[in-house]
Amino acid sequence: MNADIPARVAASLDLPLRSVAATASLLAMGATVPFISRYRKEHTGGLDETAIRSIETEIRRLEELDRRRDTIIDTISEQGKLTAELEERLRAATTAAALEDLYLPYRPKRRTRATVARERGLEPLARMLMSASGLADPEAAARRFVAGDVADTGAALAGASDIIAEWAAESPRLRSRLRGIMRRTASVRSVIAPGKEDHPDAAKYRTYARYSHPLRNIPSHCYLALRRGQAEGLLRVSVEIDDRAAVDSLAEAFVPRAGADASRRLVAAAVADSYRRLLRPSIDTEMAAEWKERADGVAINLFSGNLRQLLMAAPLRGRRILALDPGFRTGCKAVALDAEGNLLDHDVVYPNPPQADTVGAMRTLMRLIDDHELDAIALGDRTASRETEAFLRSSGIADFTEVFVVSENGASVYSASPLAGKEFPDHDVTVRGAVSIGRRLIDPLAELVKIDPKSIGVGQYQHDVDQSALRDALDFTVMSCVNSVGVDLNTASPQLLSYISGIGPALAERIVAYRAAHGAFASRRALLDVPRLGAKAFEQAAGFLRVPDSANPLDNTGIHPESYPLVERMAADLGMDTAALAGNAEAIARIDPARYADAGEATVADVLDELRKPGRDPRGSADNADFDSAIHTIDDLSEGMILTGKVGNITAFGAFVDIGIKEHGLLHVSQMGARRVTDPSTVVSIGDIIRVRVIGVDIDRRRISLSIKDL
């Protein structure tokens, strides 16, 4: 890493240089973002995870920029064209666009009209036309160049104009000016592609059949929808600016001010030609990538936020679960799970048409409940969910066993995966899918980490955005959630352990293999017995791992082992041991933090916070939605109804709410409150149980509009 990067990052993110430098140093030594934000607050000045992640991302960007800069400088130097002034400008470039603009004249290029003109010896004529004094009589000057392949003065001036057009296209000043014009004034327009009006999928793009919007503030979901429609051949999309005004602005910046009128007219014409053939197409492509990156960023951030809310959904602790994957013809797959999610038993029941064997289904389910002492039901939310729920209530099963409707998104992906096959080699996909539904209720985080986040169903245009950037963001979100909750070292799956700071997939497999061979870990320190798990990995991981049955109660807290001596000092000063101190509110209240200032103010505060509630889970307790039992299909809805709903997904334009039927209703941002809402996630979160009013029902399009205004 270049020595000046911390200063550049600090300036870019408006953060204290000292904090950025410390964070950069820790990252360079292999520390993870969760570890730094949680256990190195004294070093960073208390920067939170978001700030540290931004520093990590900006360092990566600047390092890539510097590598590209070095490559460009070496390439131009090898050409023998690197001057001190050019090198200074290259080293001063702060963006990739500025760097590439400077490199453009030296970039190897295919044979162009300007190349041909240079080969014919017309570059001196082009320089004359561009000179401060210009040429009063370009025709007369051009006669000197009529020879060989240059047939006449017209050909000479045309060739010189081609060279000038290429100079204009490679001018950093003109490229920057055109970018500015497009950022300020460009609009996107779309229509249904000719001949596609009756295409079955054209209805999806009805909103964009006659669409126009300034690109500077187009909503991300609209831009991504336009690109998708264009890629599918259903939309014709164009980006428009005032071409004449743009050419005039570029000519004003490029045409010699004091040149002769005849020369100025030729140069201005060359600029117009450059705009049409070279500049506009090049900047169009570049700006499309910029707008796409911006739209991707919004969509990825939204997806990451939704995923975080889903992963941080409250678990249902200590309950034994009857999990049901509902269906009609193929029946409902039923599995019994203990409180840790272990499979105890399974069967199939047929309470719904066509069999409608409600008596047999009731007997089978009651047997599973009685035999395994099950006390909660996890019911999948897809096909036959409401019908199965109605059966559970009418049969009396739900009278003493609470029913939770659980999202099935991604369950089929998991059930068919190699991981599911490894976990349940003797069971088919139907059993695996039902187990996944039940485990999502027991511990959403532990189960959902087994599934590709894109399959969980809480994104928006996730298949249209940059997949590498999406994967990076979602992996970080999962890692952040896993580490903020912590995991039980003796029960966590390899997938869950792999997201713990400092571990990763290979080491997670070794930990689980060691656990299987040697039994449960007795303490955090026992983790060091795992082959190839060194002190560095232990330092990064230990604070996020929990050992509930350890002889040391601190092993079941978020207190890092490096702070155990601090806790021991506190306990000794109070005349007790650490076991008596943990959770002892009266004793903790007598601790004077200033007495332990040598350990760091932030560290002391975090330690005391953990001691007050050892082993706490930040996710809270699971809530259940009580849907209206009279509503079974969209046909049962009418405007004005007040219903209970559960937020299932959040987009840039609103939230989709499960109201207990197949179709989820849209709570548009305009219906979220008296004031204008720009970010739906500031009003509702995934999993929220809310009251909604039905304000529109479109039976033909299967769409439901909802509102929470005045509720």
Image: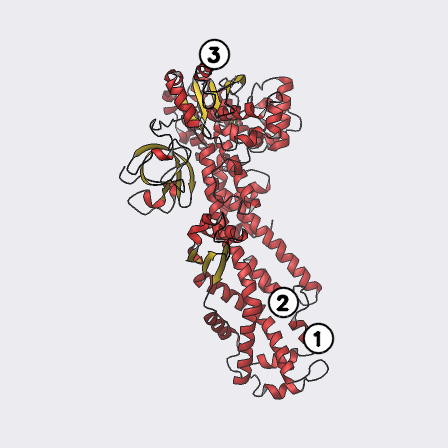
Tell me: residue 309, above or below residue 68: above
Q: Which is nearer the eye, 24 or 336?
A: 336
Would residue 540 be found to the left or right of residue 49 on screen? right
Tell me: residue 380, above or below residue 708: above
Measured as percent of width and height from the top left, residue 206 is found at 43, 51
Q: Which is nearer the eye, 18 or 666?
A: 666
**Residue for point 45% across, 32% down:** 312
Mark 1 highlights which residue?
Answer: 119
Secondary structure found at label 2: helix
Q: Residue furthest right?
A: 148
Mark 2 highlights which residue?
Answer: 105
Measured as percent of width and height from the top left, residue 668 is found at 36, 43
Mark 3 highlights which residue?
Answer: 367
The amino acid marked with disc number 3 is: Arg
The amino acid marked with disc number 2 is: Pro
**Mark 2 closeness class: few <14, some 14–19, many ≥20 residues within 10 Å:** some
Q: Which is nearer the eye, 119 or 281?
A: 281
Tell me: residue 699, above or below residue 198: above
**Residue for point 50% across, 58% down:** 194
Q: Are marks 3 and 1 in contact (CB under 8 Å)?
A: no
Q: Nearer the viewer, mark 2 or mark 1?
A: 1
Q: Nearer the viewer, mark 3 or mark 1?
A: 3
**Mark 1 closeness class: few <14, some 14–19, many ≥20 residues within 10 Å:** few
